[in-house]
Amino acid sequence: MIDLDGDGIRARPAMRPPAAVVGMRLAEVDTPALLIDLDAFETNLRLMQQAIAGYNVQLRPHAKTHKCPTIALAQIALGAVGVCCQKVSEAEALVDGGVGDVLISNEVVGAAKVARVAALAQRARISICVDDPEQVVVLAAAMAQADPQSGLGDQATTLDVLVEIDVGAKRCGVAPGEPAVRLAQLVSQQPQLRFAGLQAYQGSAQHRRTVDERRAAIAAAAELAGHTRDLLQAAGIECPKITGGGTGTFLLEADSGIYNELQAGSYVFMDADYAANEWAGSGQPAFQQSLFVWTTVMSRTPGVRAVVDAGLKSSSVDSGLPTLADETPAKYVNVSDEHGVIALNGAPDYALGQKLKLIPGHCDPTVNMHDSFVCYRGDRVEAIWPITARGCAW
Amino acid sequence: MIDLDGDGIRARPAMRPPAAVVGMRLAEVDTPALLIDLDAFETNLRLMQQAIAGYNVQLRPHAKTHKCPTIALAQIALGAVGVCCQKVSEAEALVDGGVGDVLISNEVVGAAKVARVAALAQRARISICVDDPEQVVVLAAAMAQADPQSGLGDQATTLDVLVEIDVGAKRCGVAPGEPAVRLAQLVSQQPQLRFAGLQAYQGSAQHRRTVDERRAAIAAAAELAGHTRDLLQAAGIECPKITGGGTGTFLLEADSGIYNELQAGSYVFMDADYAANEWAGSGQPAFQQSLFVWTTVMSRTPGVRAVVDAGLKSSSVDSGLPTLADETPAKYVNVSDEHGVIALNGAPDYALGQKLKLIPGHCDPTVNMHDSFVCYRGDRVEAIWPITARGCAW
């Protein structure tokens, strides 16, 4: 009845309609889709700039959160000095998208990747972190080999290098103090590298639940960073920058008098894990949830549960399950690849086909699953922004 | 020094080299990358066909695991009757890639999606699940409206519809017994739909750790499915197919005498979560780990830990952290977006830049993060297979 000849089938083009188009009503957007509430998003960008206006700090938001040059350029237009990212391929996507100043806030290892960093430094202002002498030598050699004619200018370029110190996260970074000074000295000795300062990011502090825990963790980190800066100065090495901070703690770094650059990223979107932090007394701006996973009720057991079409391939569960954006006793209680089970807990039954907003447990890896943001205002789709650096992990 | 004029930068094309090319030595493949060990992969495909050869069952592997038409066609070439997937966009990608028989093993809700199912059914043999009368009516209307001239033939096409029953997973599905019979009767009354049987997938049984737990769960599921089939027959409704089963239990379904189609998917790759199941006495074939995340040591704290460049954006942690493929006391103990922390536990220090294979905690969502499989044999890259349906969640 149906001609299943393989060649015939293959010859037909893909005719997949997009999940959303500009001008569409939100209710018409197919699911799952990753939504940005533009009013909330724009509020968050303004709140951040207002919050740090009184401090001697610059904002360099982390683009690993959004992986989107459109958003990076919006942050820069509002006052950010540039953005951070974690991977070379992310930096390439951001520079390709028009971002002129990118800190790869991470160590980069391997000849192929380092050569790409050196090439990128011919095209934009690039900075990078090190925590091992071997990296310094390899980076300097790659910069020496990079062809300046491939760049925008004809003068020799340099790469800004930050020494990462471990201020309590127990991940990357040399020990603060003398080991950091020795590494900074090695960087300073390389003509193609410029020692730009210290990265002192206390990642594990961001999601400590109480304000006191976060305050204590950042006070300890700032003391270690300040001590290292003093040792550098005593050794005759200028330390122009101390960079770090995240959405959970950035006001503490700003207030420390030690940090002068902040890397917060999640504040543009927020998520359920940040919502679980205690904020009272922290001075934290009232960032709004702007990122949602749009999902449809696809199955129901009346009086008991509903099943939605967004599971762990649409909303990352590494930091907990998504939550329902609407006020309700119902709760998202179980997840599988493409299903989320909502226990009604006495809430009325959802309709089959009803669409709901979920708040992701963790914004960054959720964004990394999707190809575009469906940006809406009120009940209309206003823009579709490609997540250009999605999957850029190498 | 550097001209940071935005237009100048945007005008430059992206020059990102691929992480791997065919013929490259595995050691040269940049990281993170998703590897397939082709010898192990091919062994797994053969082992599955051998394992079910003595049973009255057909294999319809789940393509949500690999999202790759190349692999689906390899499975079909070895004897599979077609594949399953969960989403309409996955089905479209598979049909576009030459797969002629796809079961969407899931409910599909919403006018836009249902219209796509009807259109796809003009191009390939499509089947789908229902668990609500409303879906049946909408599917029938969409099939009536679909233009048969858009298909490969000029005859009216039908859509195969399976009634999903809940056999213990507490997710989708109507109750077994009379509710399923009533829904099957409704399907049978629609001229554009063909009642194709029951889906009785016991998803929650797949990762129960002991053989006895899995056996009890599938025995209960098979009894419910068999009872429903008997009621259908008593009502004069033929039930040609009972489909279900996964990598954790497929021999139990095969041996039940009730199921005649198996949906196992993960067996092609395996993962750390399946490795944690007890298999002794189950008769399970010795499926080999064929899927790995290739990662580089990017930072070291000698004697204590190493940090690798594959975090939770490269290997899904929903079912546990990745494990190290090599025999070692070292252990992957902590994860963040783009970092994995390996505690040495007395193992010798890794070298900076050393590459390691990780076994993902859960294969399906890990695959969904990557754009291609780097397929190797021995120490050479033999193929790059695009993960065509990556991100196809809608």
Image (spheres, coloured by chain):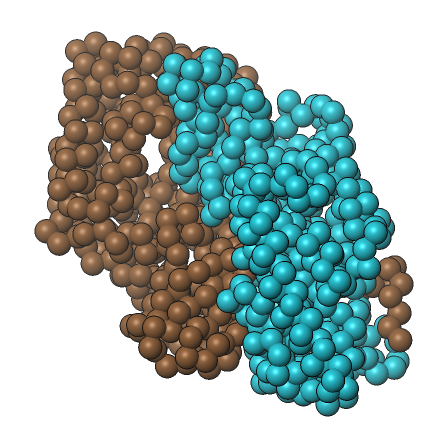
Chain colours: A brown, B cyan
Position of residue A326 in the picture relative to residue B335 (left or right)? left
Q: Where residue B106 appears, x then y in whole percent?
A: 62, 68
Of residue A338 and residue A133, the one placed in the foreground of this image is: A338
Quadrant showing the C terminus of chain B: bottom right
The residue at the point 28 percent across, 52 percent down is A274
Position of residue A227 in the picture relative to residue A293 (left or right)? left
Q: Residue furthest left?
A: A281
Residue A298 in view here: yes
Position of residue B137 in the picture relative to residue A157 (left or right)? right
Residue B191 vertical position relative to residue B175 in the rendered view, above or below? below
Q: Where residue A214 appears, x then y in whole percent?
A: 18, 40
Q: Quadrant of residue A13?
A: bottom right
Q: Where residue B67 appears, x then y in whole percent?
A: 66, 52
Q: Quadrant of residue B267?
A: top right
Position of residue A109 in the picture relative to residue A278 (left or right)? right
Count of number-bearing discs:
0
Residue A111 vertical position relative to residue A312 in the rendered view, above or below? above
Q: Quadrant of residue A106?
A: top left
The residue at the point 17 percent across, 11 percent down is A234
Quadrant showing the N terminus of chain B: top left
The residue at the point 45 percent across, 56 percent down is A315
Residue A16 in view here: no
Q: Where residue B143 appears, x then y in whole percent?
A: 72, 82
The residue at the point 73 percent across, 90 percent down is B189
Of residue A297 and residue B285, the one placed in the foreground of this image is: B285
